[in-house]
Image (tube, rainbow, N blue to C red):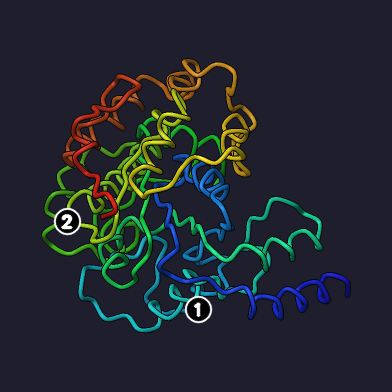
Amino acid sequence: MIQEAKQEIFSLATQFALCDVEDTIVVSGAPRSGTTWLAELLRELPSYKMLNEPLNISSSALTKDIEGVQWRTYLEKGTSFPELHTALYRALTGDVDALWMWRFHSDRPSLMLYEHLSHQKLVVKIIRASRMLGWLSDSFPVRAIVHTFRHPCAVVASQMNYKAVWSKASPPSAREMRDELGAGLPDKIWKEIQPATQYMRTAAGTLALVWAIDALCVLQYPVHRPFVVTTYEDLLLDTKREVKRILDLINELVPQNMLERFEVPSHSASQSLETGNVSKQLVKWKDILSTDQIDEVLTITQQVGIEFYTEQPMPEQPFLREQVKPAQ
């Protein structure tokens, strides 16, 4: 009864808490790549609040019933998808009354309501958008899209260490990879992906190929909005410098309350996060994955053509810096 009343009040308040899509910042990246941490940092910008995962089809009140929306829906520029467009417009303007999709600073109902009503700009975190970023940027005049990469071995290790649904992933057939995990990839992309499928032997390889497909789609299709590429590794090594670089590209200053959150783990951080030992955190995947698994992950990602991550913990910076499109 109390929960129902709280939800009803929140639903009413949402009508008065809508945001302008032109102020919205989208944070994207693979699952377990630091997107929650980055989104929670950007939430510290003046008047911003955070909406979480509108494309999660198992729980999102917006997209779970839309036919054709998959875990990683692939959409090219110019594709007509009115139902998804309507749902994402609602997400990008904060027209979402499902309380569980929001990430407020406090769990107290009164403070959540105050933040919802008083903060009328939006950070939207979407880990399922990598294969539609070009479409999204053409469809909505958002303020910026910030995409974060993380070493594929670290992502795979974190996924396998986090949820049973990932750790039990089995190598699919070529058809399953294309039609299910591949979410209907077109021939031009599938031709680049298919040779790598022969190297999948374990769950690590399956997850690596999913990571590689996401990365390939981000890098091959232009984003026509201010587009900032960062990496988990850069954020971890020097959070202040990297956040300042991101905010410079969208013409924002680093607020004091954001500085105070640099050492705070995200809402979804692993309990084994090494906050006090950056070097150890960067190579923790070497303790989780076997030598064979590491070789499998890197072989697959490099076969797909994603070569800026190697056996070294840090990415090759020049290539990633070229992907940036600053605000005008």
Label 1 Cα neighbours within 10 Å, binned few <14 / some 14-19 / many ≥20: few
Q: Amino acid type of disc 1?
A: Asp
Q: Amino acid type of disc 2?
A: Trp
Q: Nearer the viewer, residue 304 or 215?
A: 215
Q: Nearer the viewer, residue 190 or 123?
A: 123
Q: Which residue is mark 2?
A: 190
Looking at the rendered image, the disc whose residue lies closer to the viewer, 1 or 2, is 1
Q: Which residue is mark 1?
A: 65
Q: Report whether 127 appears left or right of 47.
A: left
Measuring 54% from the left and 49% from the top, which residue is drawn there? 45
Q: Nearer the viewer, residue 160 or 2?
A: 2
Q: Report whether 18 appears left or right of 76.
A: right
Q: Mark 2 falls on what kind of element?
A: helix
Q: Is residue 210 above or below residue 11?
A: above
Q: How many marks?
A: 2
Q: Report whether 129 appears left or right of 182.
A: right
Q: Where's residue 112, x and y in %?
A: 74, 60
Measuring 19% from the left and 32% from the top, which residue is drawn there? 307
Measuring 50% from the left and 65% from the top, which residue is drawn there? 54
Measuring 27% from the left and 49% from the top, which residue is drawn there? 326
Going from N to C along the chain, the mark reached first, 1 or 2, is 1
The Cα atoms of the two marked residues, 1 and 2, are separated by 27 Å
Q: Mark 1 falls on what kind of element?
A: loop
Indicate the quadrant containing the N terminus: top left, top right, bottom left or bottom right. bottom right
The image quarter in which residue 221 lies: bottom left
